[in-house]
Amino acid sequence: MKTRTLFLSLLLVGASALGGIALSSCVEESSSDGTVGSSSSAEGSSSSAGAGADSSSSSSSSVEEGGEGDLPDWDTEVERYYEDVDWTKEGNDLMKDLTGTIRPHDTLSYNSLWSAYSSTDVRADGTLWDMYSDIHWKPGQKQCGNYKKEGDCYNREHSVPKSWFGDKSPMNTDLHHIVPTDGYVNNRRSNNPLGEVGSATYTSGNGSRLGKSSYPGYSGTVFEPVDEYKGDFARIYFYFVTCYASTRSSWETGSTNLSNSGLGLNSWSKEMFLEWAEMDPVSQKEIDRNEAVFDIQGNRNPYVDMPEAAELVFGA
């Protein structure tokens, strides 16, 4: 299998090497009535503890970071999917190519997301991943619903809060950014942007934190996922602003991670997400989820398939 470094090199020299032909390949928002949520836990390809566990299971040491996963075989289906992308481009030019490829996709019903999680977010032990807590949820059980504490139920979290884009379709049912999370923790996040916390006012069971931002460029309240999932969320945001670039003029930009101009992320968020993506490389969990969402929804996250695209687009 090609390494990522070699593959990026091939992409950048593809045009000349092939006689001038560019190589083409490579939250649900919490609400005040307590009906929505999100969660996080240490990430890996499987869970060594909690097999058969119910939704009350919780242990921050039960899941080990899976490390970098095995990227798809670019000689087959994935390469064909990106055949119209010119990977020798950078910045907004490359984003436009990616938008044209990933924007066409099936629009799902909101209710169908519950059953989709059995394919997109299932662990090796049959329970669901939760990036805001360490709860191992059994698919279809303890769906929110009402809650009073962490572990009561899980819901469909818009990683990019739906109030930021006016709860418009198809963003409001896009599986790539809507993940199963603990309802109580999601409610504590509310619609605050993702960021890095100095002194926390709330900490979830797996270490996700709420508090005042310590990252340069923003001083408001932010929600910080644990390190094992920071890259996941960065690549989700890269996907969202790329897929829905044509709608960015209507996005809410006050106290969010978004921007109405440029590449769709405000400057401090862009820098932070690039750091997160480098610190937490693509894991097997993300690769498996990307494949499962593709099977259901019909589009892919290019920043999972080709991690270097983040730097090519947002770091250019």
Image (tube, rainbow, N blue to C red):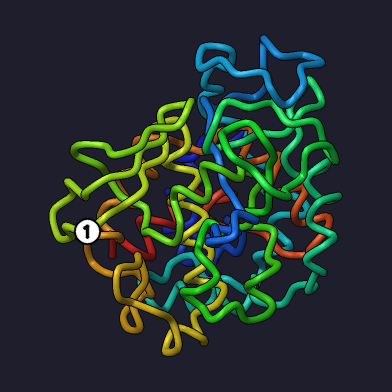
- Which residue appears at 38% of the width and 32% of the height? 203
Does dot 1 land on a helix, a strand or a loop? loop
In x, y percent, where is residue 8?
Answer: 45, 49
Q: Nearer the viewer, residue 219 or 229?
A: 219
Q: Badge 1: few (under 14), some or many (20 or more) residues near its Cα, within 10 Å?
A: some
Point out the residue furthest to the left here: 216
- Which residue appears at 64% of the width and 43% of the height? 147
In x, y percent, where is residue 69?
Answer: 59, 31
Residue 200 located left or right of residue 186: left
Which amino acid, by three-letter code, is at mark 1?
Gly
- Which residue appears at 56% of the width and 43% of the height? 184
In the rendered image, the quadrant that contains the N terminus is top right
The image quarter containing residue 102 is bottom right
Count of numbered labels shown in the rendering: 1
Residue 154 located left or right of residue 118: left
Residue 306 located left or right of residue 121: left
Is residue 294 shown above or below 183?
Answer: below
In the rendered image, the quadrant that contains the C terminus is bottom left
Is residue 208 shown above or below 276?
Answer: above
Residue 187 located left or right of residue 249: right
Q: Nearer the viewer, residue 138 or 69?
A: 138
In x, y percent, where is residue 223?
Answer: 36, 48
In x, y percent, where is residue 43?
Answer: 55, 27
Disc 1 designates what residue?
220
Is residue 4 shown above or below 240?
Answer: above
- Which residue appears at 51% of the width and 86% of the height? 247
